[in-house]
């Protein structure tokens, strides 16, 4: 197949401005892009549930 892309399950999240600001600060502190920080936090959440 031409142009075949791997299918990745997508999740939509909604964050308040304060939550997003906290997420950005944490990502900067841990020297990780915000998108990677979200993935990291979701993996931790999945392990707890």
Image (cartoon, rainbow, N blue to C red):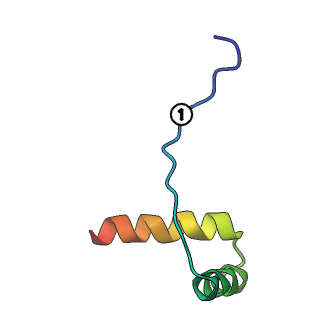
Quadrant holding the N terminus: top right
Does 22 appear above or below 36?
A: below
Q: Quadrant of residue 2?
A: top right
Residue 7 on image: x %, y %: 53, 34
Residue 27 on image: x %, y %: 67, 79
Residue 48 on image: x %, y %: 30, 72
In what element is the residue under mark 1? loop
Q: Quadrant of residue 16?
A: bottom right
Task: Describe residue 17's horizontal placement relative to residue 44 as left or right.
Answer: right
Residue 23 on image: x %, y %: 62, 81
Residue at coordinates 41% horizontally, 70% vertically from top-left? 44
* Residue designated by label 1: 7
Residue at coordinates 63% horizontally, 28% vertically from top-left? 5
Does 4 appear above or below 29?
A: above
Task: Describe residue 11's horizontal placement relative to residue 18 as left or right.
Answer: left
Quadrant holding the C terminus: bottom left
Give whichever of 21, 31 is nearer the camera.
21
Residue at coordinates 61% horizontally, 89% vertically from top-left? 18
Residue at coordinates 56% horizontally, 75% vertically from top-left? 15
Does 48 appear above or below 16?
A: above
Q: Quadrant of residue 45?
A: bottom left
Give whichever of 24, 19 is nearer the camera.
19
């Amino acid at each position: 197949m031409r142009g075949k892309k791997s299918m990745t399950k997508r999740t939509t999240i909604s964050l308040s401005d304060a939550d997003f600001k906290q997420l950005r600060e944490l990502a900067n502190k841990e020297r990780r892009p915000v998108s990677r920080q979200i993935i990291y936090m979701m993996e931790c959440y999945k392990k707890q549930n």
